[in-house]
Amino acid sequence: MTVRTRGLDRSGVGLFRSLHLRRLPGDPLVLPGPWDAVSARVFVDAGFTALATPSAGVAASLGYEDGATPADEMFAAVARIVRAVDVPVSADVESGYGLAPKELVERLLEAGAVGCNLEDSNGGVLKDPRHHAEWLAEVRAVAADHLFVNARVDTFLHGDGNPERAIERAALYVAAGADCVYPIAAPTSVLPLLRSGIQGPVNVFARADGDGPSPTELGELGATRVTFGPGLQRWTARALQGMAAELKR
């Protein structure tokens, strides 16, 4: 299946998948998180070769709290971002909005996304990892090779933070067909352990304000790819607040 965006007439998912391969230590794939068409174009004009939307950043741009965006509005926002750029776009669709795997995959592909971020918690509560793995396997079966699935592991965010449990969950998700694993909020100190215990690419969160390891440093610790969550949108909003205050003055 060919994913078509503005000027992108080849297999977007194939290109996106290739960007994750053979990454050297210290050279992770850096994926900025656009929250609307304008921010997406800014990142692409700066030279980034792929993007990954943050659900919280998109929610803020639409006037919702994180986790409260209606599915229709989230998919519509993703579609607008995809149309605005000519690089592959992966979409954070939280825990799937309660959609059956077939409908979820169809809506992602209709929006033009080449990948998706799927959480293993709902409302701050961790899902049973085996049941979640079965659901991911259904998503993979429907999507075949048309979507790059990034399986988020929320044990550091909503669990006890035990890295071994994160590795156990990751193993189930990779076996179910996940292309990448995202142990969000994992402390920097455990990244080498996670890297050694997880088969396949590992997504690591970086702070957008620079108050933490750089993407290069995270790559040296084992990150295959680096994302920023809603950090870039929030950083931009703070800058705009300063501009607004100066304008008011």
Image (spheres, rainbow, N blue to C red):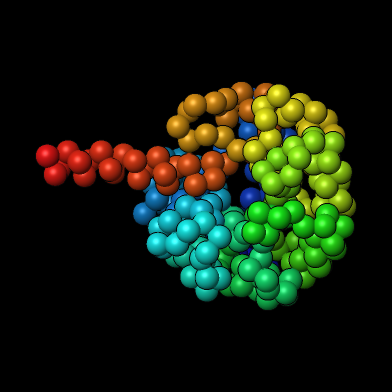
Q: Is residue 5 above or below residue 171?
A: below
Left or right for 58, reference 23: left
The picture places residue 131, in percent across and down from the top left corner, at 84, 62
Q: Quadrant of the C terminus?
A: top left
For this rendering, which residue is in front, 95 or 160? 160
Quadrant position of residue 224: top right
Residue at left 57%, top 30%?
215
Query: Between 159 and 86, which is closer to the camera in this rendering?
Result: 159
| Residue 220 screen position, x and y as percent | 67, 24
Vertical side of 24 occupied by 97: above or below: below
- Using the image as rendered, state which of residue 127 and residue 197 is in the foreground: 127
Q: Residue at x 83, y 30 (%)?
A: 196
Percent coordinates x, y for residue 179 in the rendering: 76, 50
Residue 36: percent from left, percent from top:
41, 57
Q: Is residue 101 visible?
A: yes
| Residue drawn where x is 57% and y is 25% of the image | 213
Residue 88 in sight here: no
Count of marks, rendered view: 0
Q: In the picture provided, is 198 more to the left or to the right than 246?
A: right
The quadrant in which the N terminus is found is bottom right
- Quarter assignment of residue 111: bottom right
